Image (cartoon, grey):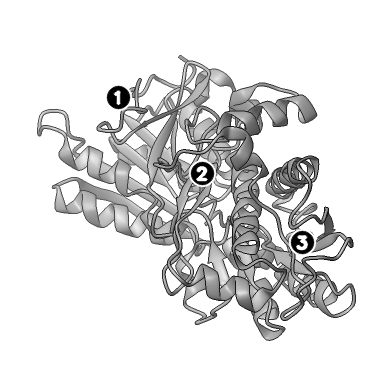
Amino acid sequence: MEENRRTRRLRSKAGRSRLFTTLGVAASAGALLAACGSSSSAATGSGSSSSKPIVIGISLPLGGDFSADGLAFKQGYQLWANNVNAHGGILGRQVSLKIISDNSDPAQAQTDYQQLITVDHVDLTFGPFSTLLTIPAAKVAARYGYAMIEGAGGGPTVFAQGLHNVFDVSAPVANAMVPFAKWLASLPASQRPKTAAYPTSNDPFTEPQILLAKKIMEAAGIKTVYFNVFGSEVTDFTPIASAVAATNADVVMLGSVDVPTASAFIQDFAQQHYNPKAFIATGGPDQGSQFIQAVGQSNANGTMVPNTWYPGAKTPGSAALVQAYIAKYGGNASAVSADVAEAYSVGQVTQQAIEHVGKVNNQAIISYLHSGAALTSVQGPVKFNSLGENTAALIFGFQWVNGNFQQVLPLSDPASSGLQYPKPNWGA
């Protein structure tokens, strides 16, 4: 496979798997922010009484197609490590992050984790970004007996590998669009959309979401007037967006993996004065200020996206995380990417596992995470099934409403409010 095709297919948020979850645990924000870390001397080391730092190896896409996501993940990991170290570390040891760049290339990600484990001899590894990067990373980690705890690799193909060492702290990707699809299907016939269009990239993050949502909506009588899986090598989205606009579909569900893809469709729709009643993308609108800068605030208004977390989340520790982000990186709450919370949650879950087993030991961590233990994170509750999926996570829908990124689905949740349907026209 050519490198440009390979790297562009990495745009999986499995996913951009980014979905807010309610948390029924009583814990202080400070405790949750300090509640995580990582330590592990390879597969069997103990080291709980050592004064040596716990070194965590991470490969991230700090260059290439996913550089924006890679930067956000780096910020989330660093915020977590800074907080842990300010609270005395884990088992009395400080945390040190060793982060290298894979430049959005799965082959390089594989090489990076090989180096981190066999040359740098890190104690633990944290996951990279995306489903396609997580697969090779987790395979390397499994070969050497390392746990691979990650926050943006929740596509079904990750868990189809049959690995025992991979754990995704975010919600399973395939279910991401379900709240949106079920909401539309539940509308009275007079309000329910009649037609829908489904353009999606050929990506293990996007396709599972789109296919399941399409099935739900068709069962509710919403006619499919456009369905197209476009190749990962596509860079000019104008012909596809124009074909969607020509259908005049009431709803557009876009399988996108990043801001540029979502932005290209929105800009083309706006130019053609095509205003669907609802527009949702699997990835892109969750990227805070980067999304707003790309499409403009007026075009963002009414745009939706599924996720596990947003800056206004009420889960313990979430507000403190947002404050810490703004203090270190600037901006405002709505500018904080969900990637930051995903990465932060990886650290939180890892620390809880280490502190429970009482030592830095990968095999002990893996066993504990497979025990069905109830854990917590700023994204909400975490509980892994036998595959390593977080079965406790709930999925929500979010929308840009007059410059604010807020939770709007499901309607039954007390935190949901302000849903705009039909969405305002582009530029309104």
Choose the circle earlier in sequence order: 1 or 2.
2
Judge by depth and name the residue closer to the eye, 45 or 348: 45
| Front tag of 1 and 2 | 2
Disc on res. 379:
2
Characterize the local packing of mark 1: few (<14), some (14-19) or many (20 or more) Cα atoms within 10 angstroms. few
The image shows residue 56 at horizontal and vertical percentages of 78, 62
Residue 136 shows in the view = no
Please indicate whether residue 115 sits to the left or right of residue 65 in the image. right
Residue behind mark 3: 58
Q: Is residue 150 visible?
A: yes
Q: Residue at x 65, y 56 (%)?
A: 351
N-terminal-most mark, 1 or 3? 3
Q: Residue at x 64, y 69 (%)?
A: 148
Q: Quadrant of residue 288?
A: top right
Report the residue marked by disc 1: 421
State how far apart marks 1 and 3 are (Cα). Answer: 41 Å
Is residue 199 toward the left or the right of residue 120 in the image? left
- The three-letter code of the residue at mark 2 reads Gln
Alpha carbon separation for disc pair 1 and 2: 27 Å
